[in-house]
Amino acid sequence: MRQMLQLLLLALSCLEATTAGAAPVSATSSTEAFARARREHRYVILDLEAVWCHWCHVMDRETYANKGVQDVLAKNYVVLKLDQDAHPDFAARYGDWGWPATIVFSPDGRELYKHRGYIEAPAMIDLLKAIVDDPTPRASAISVPVVATTTATLTTDQRKARLADYVSFYDAEHGDWGDTQRYIDAASVELAIELAGDGDKQAEHMARQTLDGNLALIDPVWGGVYQYSIGPGWGRPHFEKIMSFQANDMRLYALAYATWKEPKYLHAAQAIQRYMTGFLLAPDGAFYVSQDADLSSTVDGHVYYALEDTARRARGLPAIDRHQYTRENAWAIAALCQVHDSLGDTDALERATRTAHWVVAHRALRGGFRHDEKDAAGPYLADNMAMANALLTLYRSTGERTWLTRAETTLTFIDAYFRTRDAGYQSAPPSKDDTGALAEPLRNEDDNVALARIANLAWRTTANPRYQHMSEHAARYALAWANAHPKSFMPGLLLVDHEMSAEPLHVAVVGAREDARAQALHAAALEYPALYRRIDWWDPREGPLPNPDVTYPKLARPAAFVCTGNACSPPVFEPQQVAAAVDRLRALAAPVND
């Protein structure tokens, strides 16, 4: 009797499973996903999402939970869902396709299809069935070959063409260089500010119009900046608050205030800083990653963020991603240093220093840095590159050589782990278990632009030719990618070209660290608004400067010296005279137009 009852229960359970439909096959890593796909003759669908992403939540709720979608997935696919913030290698590889990004692979790892953004359930069903019927790679999955260049800088004609594209992409009516989304693209605004510093009034207008438009994306209640607005204007925000946007916008508003002394830019930088320290700062001194756009599936950001403080808190807080990634903390460090430099905010520098000590204590890895406490793969270029920049920035803002030494150690780590043979640096060393497209070294053009700038500044600061070679190696790949994609928008390439071709603004303060007069001169040097700059503080008791390219006289009192590639100013003794000395020397060094 007992045996018959067991058989009956087994039959009922099988009937229930058949009626409900089989559950989709899922995997937690690419290695597991492709092993199972090969074994069971399935395709792999990668759903690359972000925990803060509104449309990722909608796609989970409306598409992946749909029975028709689940049935097709269960029959033919292995589903791999990854958080792009936790996987910088996947984020670098597929950043142009999301979020959410949908990538479909053959069992052997060939890319068959790539899609950007939300896919409705009926369209997803049609897509999944079409790939099974015809697994030929679609146009979106076919890559343009990149051939390494022998040079690292643009020709005169290339420079003119890229500058013309940069201006033509600008939306003169609304500001910003986007089309469907409005936000501050950091490289675009940096280039505009750099050109404005050379007297380009059109560039100044573009920078200020974009910064002014973006003010609409700053939360008037808590501060912090929303991710973007749906165009054409700035009035339809998506409410995610992500560290990359907080750090870049705060940094650029601080620089804008130092440049134009507009109170609105000061207030914007302070509002973002208030949010970062009030919501994303952990008790241990490190920063969290992001805050969700929505409170829940029934209370989205449009409803929630229209409320005042008390009403928001009564309903609860949108989820905060409490991971403490090296990359995000490095972005925060660099931004806080800019706030200190431009606004004289000593608390910001203290916070940046504390965060840097936390990262060194908790994320150090053989001279470089991990991403998280434990990484799924890695190490990743993004973390180490961001931290090298943060350490260089701390050296500039404090004058303390320990930060420069650590930056050099990190750059050495980058050169050892991420350098590729012909040109450029890869986002992560491939795993021996990777297959197909994932086994191919990934070189991201934006990462190589950023690294070229960082390594170039390290070379100017230390005179170590290794960093010059790193800068050129990274720039060659960025230029090669641009040549392969002539219609691409790459303002960062123009920044690289400018910085590699010229000496940075150089201000050296000579004086003892404990001397208040030297401290005031250093603060004045930091306050001068320039993106591309080298600030040294030389206390002769510490030995020669890291780059002793100038011999400074011994004086009875602290002094600042402003230098260009071929000249230095007389000693400046008063802090209020530093900016005027810089302006005079820059004017003398400027090219004369016929």
Image (spheres, rainbow, N blue to C red):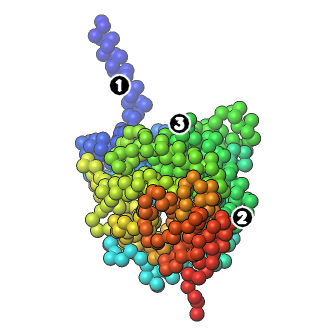
Furthest-bottom residue in view? 594
Q: Which residue is mark 2?
A: 261
Location of residue 189 with respect to 134 vertically, above or below: below
Disc 3 and disc 1: Cα gap in Å?
52 Å
- Asked if disc 2 and disc 1 are in contact, CB closer than 8 Å, the reply is no
Looking at the image, can residue 8 be seen? yes
Q: Residues within 10 Å of mark 2 (few under 14, many from 20)?
A: few
The residue closer to the viewer here, 211 or 259, is: 259
Location of residue 379 with respect to 580 vertically, above or below: above
Looking at the image, can residue 297 be seen? no
For residue 104, side relative to residue 346 (left or right): left
The residue closer to the viewer here, 78 or 392, is: 392
- The residue that appears at 43% across and 59% down in the rendered structure is 543
Q: Which residue is mark 3?
A: 284
Disc 2 and disc 3: Cα gap in Å?
34 Å
Which mark, residue 298? none
Q: Residues within 10 Å of mark 3 (few under 14, many from 20)?
A: few
For residue 388, side relative to residue 537 (left or right): left
Which mark, residue 14? 1
Tell me residue 297's x, y (percent).
Answer: 60, 38
Mark 3 or mark 1, whichever is nearer to me: 3
Which quadrant does the N terminus fall into?
A: top left
First in sequence, mark 2 or 1: give its number: 1
The residue closer to the viewer here, 250 or 70, is: 250
Tell me residue 178's x, y (percent).
Answer: 59, 65
- The residue that appears at 45% across and 47% down in the rendered structure is 326
